[in-house]
Image (cartoon, rainbow, N blue to C red):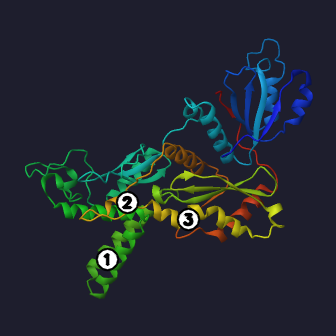
Amino acid sequence: MLDLDYSQEFEASREQDFFAAVPPRAGVLRVEMRSSGAPPYLLRTADLRRAAERLLRAPEPGSKRLNLRDVAGRICYRLTGSKFEQTLTFYEQAKRHAPERYREMLRLRPPAVLKVNLPNEYPRCYVTRRIRDDAGFYFGPFASRRAAEAFSSAFLDLFKTRRCQIRIRRDPSFPGCIYSEMKMCLAPCFAGCTEEEYDAELLKAVEALATCGGALTRRIEVEREAASEALDYERAASLHRRLEKVSAVVRSLPGLARRIDDLDAVILQPGAEEKTVAVFPLSAGLLGEPLFLRFGELSSQPRSVEAILRQALEPFGPAAAREREPKAEEGVRSWRPRYGLHRAPPELSEHLSLVSRWFYSNPRDGEILFREDDWPYRRILRASSRVLSRSDGSNPSPADSTRAQS
């Protein structure tokens, strides 16, 4: 997807011309060895020329720094216009050339998400870092496990689903837990509710998460209006207080967190070339092939930029989202397959980790726009203009150089 598109043979006798040809720009560098069996050395840096000189110039006497002058045969590199593009390029190169170590090289850790284990007879919502295609409902990602647990605790206070980890046996002699005593759980453990009642309460919680609180807010607003029209002002006031509580919980939700199946967005980053914006599509949490909008060249194209965006993003649009939804089944719990995650390739957690690392960074460069019913093409164009104006036609340098050996 993001290949290293420049290469140079290294000859120590012509080192001055060699180093002069390497641009002093941010990018990803791979040093290939003359020995066919030797693994390459991979790094990301804010200055490619300085990194090449550090690795390939004659070392100073007594220096203990890594030097590859005697074993290097060629270098390959890619110029990057943003830290996000640099990290993604490094990830793909590391995964290709060091499949056993690339997670360690990037310090990749699966992001924290909320999971509702729908295949369970009495599902519960909890925080996890394991995302699998087990028909469970996944919501996130969050900045950290602590952030996910804080939101989960406040969110579950709005419903009466269980929080315990015990196996439900529906034993009337079971004493229950503190949540059942406080009437914050329907208590299926001692048959405090029927299966249908618990399933209805669970559906409310899942719908609230799937709509980022929208379904719950609308339902309470309708009930409040009905109570007001019936002159039941005490109930209307109670529903208003509940609505305020729900609104506070929804406001605490980070912008990136949503149902993983619906995590469709575009990430806009400044490109390495002048007047270029890199568009990274995100479909159900998976990063796709980037599109580079070269506005300096597009002015002479017969098609508009919006038409180019439509053609590139059409495979990730509403039709693709509908294809991800399984067919409905008969029965009381027919809604569960519709909300379950049925496609979780191994790279899903890795892509979510890369995206959440960028999204929750401070400061954060670039912009992200989410797909609702369709892609917001006009907003993408306006955001591209802002990205170009902030880059000011120059190549933004990422943070301090970091490196890892493959």
Indicate the amino acid at tag 1.
Answer: Ala
Work out whether 50 lies above or below 353: above
> Amino acid type of disc 2?
Tyr
In this image, 106 relative to 308: left or right? left
Q: Which residue is located at x 83 percent, y 29 percent?
A: 9
Of the residues under marks 1 and 2, which one precedes in the sequence?
1
Image location of residue 299, percent across then percent down = 82, 67
Q: Which residue is mark 3?
A: 317
Q: Is residue 136 left or right of residue 343?
A: left
Q: Residue furthest toward the top?
A: 62
In this image, 173 relative to 43: left or right?
Answer: left
Q: How many marks?
A: 3
Query: Is disc 1 surrounded by few (<14), some (14 to 19) or many (20+) residues within 10 Å?
Result: some
Query: SS for tag 3?
Result: loop
Q: Position of residue 350 (x, y in %)?
A: 53, 43
Do the residues under discs 3 and 1 have CB atoms within 8 angstroms? no
Comes first in the chain, label 3 or label 1: 1
Q: Position of residue 295 (x, y in %)?
A: 79, 62
**Which label's residue is closer to the chain start, 3 or 2?**
3
Q: Is residue 259 visible?
A: no
Residue 69 vs 342, above or below: the answer is above
Disc 1 from disc 2: Cα separation: 33 Å
Q: Which labelled disc corresponds to residue 339? A: 2
SS for callout 2: helix
Q: Which residue is drawn at the image coordinates 84% and 19% (left, top)?
A: 58
Identify the residue under disc 1.
237
Looking at the image, can residue 213 be seen? Answer: yes
In this orientation, which residue lies closer to the viewer: 203 or 181? 203
Residue type highlighted by circle 3: Gly
Side (left or right) of 57 relative to 168: right
